[in-house]
Image (spheres, rainbow, N blue to C red):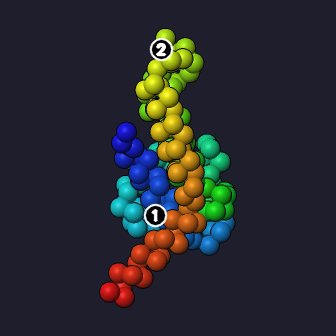
Amino acid sequence: MIITRATEYSIRALLYLSKQPRGEIVFKKDICQSQDITPAFLTKILQPLIKAGIVGSQRGVGGGFYLLKDPEEITLLDVVRAEEGPLFLNHCLERPGVCRKDCYCAVHAAWKEVREQMMSILDSYSFARLARQEEANLKNILSA
C-alpha cells in the first residue's frame, strides 16, 4: 500500500501546523512556502481534515488554517483515515461475507493481523511526537 500524494502533503502541512503556537492562524502562503505545496492543492488536501474536525480555517484577510485539537491528540492514523478512508489492505477485510473463505482462510487472518498492527502503529505517532522527533533530528544534523 502506498499512501497518496495528498495524504503525504496533508501530513507535512499538519506537522507544520503542529509546530505553531496553539490556536494561532497560520497563513496559507506560509504553509505553502514552507512545505512546497501549491495553494490550490493545500486547500484541497486540508478539506478532509477540516471535515474530520482536525483543522479549522478562517477566510478573508488574515485568514488561514489552525489546529482544532492539540497535536498530542492527533495521530497519523487520524490523518490517513481522513484522507484515504478506512484501511483494509485486502478486499476480504472490507466487511464480513465479502469473501466466502474468510471463516477458514489463513491468509485472511494474516491480513487482519497486519492491518490491526499497522493501525496500532499509526495511532501511536501523535503529531506532537513527530514534531519533537523532527526537532531532535534537525539538532543532530546541525551539531554534526
Dot 1, how many residues are within 10 Å of its Cα: few (below 14), some (14-19), or many (20+)?
many
Quarter placement of the N terminus: top left
Give the image location of residue 136, x and y in percent: 46, 77
Give the image location of residue 103, x and y in percent: 54, 17
| Residue visible at 38% across and 57% down in the picture | 37
**Element carrying mark 2:** loop
Dot 2, how many residues are within 10 Å of its Cα: few (below 14), some (14-19), or many (20+)?
few
Q: Is residue 93 above or below residue 32?
A: above
Q: Quadrant of residue 95?
A: top right
Callout 2–callout 1 Cβ contact below 8 Å: no
In the rendering, which numbered label is found on residue 4?
none
Give the image location of residue 113, x and y in percent: 51, 36
Identify the amino acid type marked 2: Lys
Give the image location of residue 83, x and y in percent: 50, 42
| Residue visible at 49% across and 11% down in the picture | 100
Residue 59 lies left or right of residue 111; in this view the side is right
In the rendering, which numbered label is found on residue 101?
2
Q: Is residue 131 above or below residue 125?
A: below
Residue to which mark 1 is pinned: 31
Q: Nearer the viewer, residue 107 or 25?
A: 107
